[in-house]
Amino acid sequence: MTRKEGIFVWKASSAALALLLVSPTLAIFYTAVGDNNDVFLHLLSTVLPTYVFNTLVLVMGVMLVSLILGVPSAWFVAMCKLPSERVLQWALVLPLVMPGYIVAYVFTDWFDFAGPVQVFLRQLTGWEVGEYWFPDIRTLAGATLILALVFYPYVYLLCRAAFMEQDITLLESAKLLRCSPWKIFFRVSLPLIRPAIAVSLSLLAMETIADFGTVSYFSVNTLTTAVYDTWFGYSSLAAASKISAMMLLFVFIALSIERYGRCKRELLQTPFKNCNNFRYELVGWKKWVALAWCWGIVFIAFVFPLLQLCIYSYRYFKDIWIIEFFEYALNSFQISITVAFFSVFIALVVNFCHRVDPSRKSILYMRISSMGYAVPGTILALGVMVPLLFIDYFINNLSEIMEWGKPGLILSGSVFALIFALVVRFSAVAIGSIESSLSKISLSLDMVSQTIGCNLSQMLYRVHFPLIRRGLLVAALLVFIESMKELNAGLLLRPFNFETLATYVFNYASDERLELAALPAVLIVLIGLIPLIIVNSSLRSNQTDEFCVICSEPNV
């Protein structure tokens, strides 16, 4: 096979995979515009405006609270000398590994009427029921606080990197003009990191719109819960597709803002040399306020919820350590390993295609293949069901014509649908990691391999594969962990009598039995800590912030 023929094969494979991965999104828009559904018109005239309003308020609230939590934390860690700063710089990322719905369960257990906080308050004051007011955690404001505690690390990671990339000459000039650190922060640093803030807020918007577990548990009606209720409550796939199309428009707008902000961030990016000579030495009460702020966020958002789950796991270990737990854990591991394998395979194909043919088409195939990450899991589940149901009906009609009997829902009614949805969603994570690894390999190695007679497949196997093994392992690991935590697609696409750890936790917590969901929740959190361990090990090099951004911000 000549090189030209080999490039054609790789381009055709990349195009086919890109079309396969984008098919659920196309199916949503096709179903949305193809039917003037009465159910959607009824929802539009009754409850849908409320759902849209709740979604907008939730997104804006999460953005605001995340900025309040993330920007000062990033400033303290990047620009100030603090005790335990080497631990703080990665500890502030820990809440990101805690799924929002798990934090929601724990906070509800604490602050509900029968929770320890209100019980202690009544015992302390002697108040009876109806004699005092206490904020209800199961509200829109409560969901905003929970999601902000989980998602603020996006703001922290990007703003910390932006603070460390400031031009030191601007800061020194402001200092010569006798500006206080407070004025330097507001007049110099904050305007310079606006692109990073725009990127982080767009990511927050996408993650908030995609959340289902938290808002469902708090009975907050958003567009995500509207898709779920319309699909299962009204059995209207067309109406659910129309709502999903509306959500995708919001997501694509946020994604466009993110891409624009990232470009602006790259234009304004300059090295911040000798930053240790400029960092502020906090003393006295200022030092303790900064430490209390940073460590307080870590303890409230991560340490205390994890300790509560560990306590429940210890107390009810005998009730949790049953055969069903092992079965559901095995289901999660099998699905996650399968998703990781196929995601890495797809990422390798589209990245190598771009490597051997760096054209606009190959870049387009990579971007299309990465679009699934921006699609919320609930919408993606709906998009996956549309083509799979069509294929299943075609197979059954063909079998009936051939008198072979009806095989049933082979694809849409099996675990294949769940695996396909997760591959579509998390291939972007693998693509970003492998793209970063391949970009570090010199093109001269490709030329040398061609001169000794290697074709493209041999070049990939003998030259590139040994050099990107670490990138492949990181990509597989990240996809594996994301698949373990995924709840939305698991709830909608799992077959009958099939549970994963995420759905297992959701079902028990929804039945107000958090103690029985504690151990699988702890397992999900501990697995999510693996990327943080990798990031912590890379703190000794100069690639920490880059790796943090890769882990939390796939290139979509």
Image (cartoon, rainbow, N blue to C red):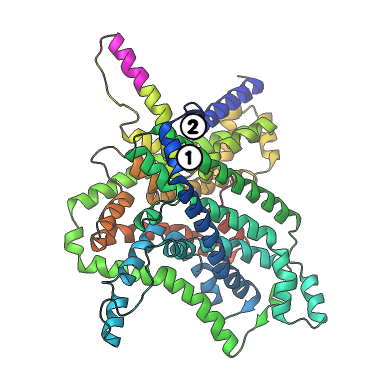
- Does residue 126 sit above or below 369 in this rendering? below
Q: Which mark is drawn over residue 32?
A: 2
Residue at 45% x, 39% y is 380
Residue 534: where, in percent of width, then height?
49, 59
- Does residue 132 sit above or below 427 in this rendering? below
**Of the image marks 2 and 1, the number of the one nearer the N terminus:** 2
Going by the image, does 62 lie left or right of 485? right
Q: Which residue lies furthest to the bottom in this view?
A: 284
Would you say the magenta stretch is mainly helix, strand or loop?
A: helix
Residue at 34% x, 37% y is 234
Where on the picture, by quarter, is residue 140? bottom left
Which region is colored magenta? 393-404
Residue at 37% x, 72% y is 304
Q: Is residue 276 magenta?
A: no
Residue 229: where, in percent of width, then height?
36, 43
Three-letter amino acid code at the position of disc 1: Ser
> Dot 2: few (<14), some (14–19), or many (≥20) neighbours within 10 Å?
many
Image quarter where the N terminus lies is top right
Report which residue position mark 1 lands on: 244
Per the image, label 1 sits on a secondary structure element best described as: helix
Q: Is the Cβ of the residue at disc 2 closer than 8 Å to that at disc 1?
A: yes
Total number of numbered discs in the rendering:
2
Going by the image, does 223 lie left or right of 60? left
Three-letter amino acid code at the position of disc 2: Ala
Going by the image, does 249 lie left or right of 522? right
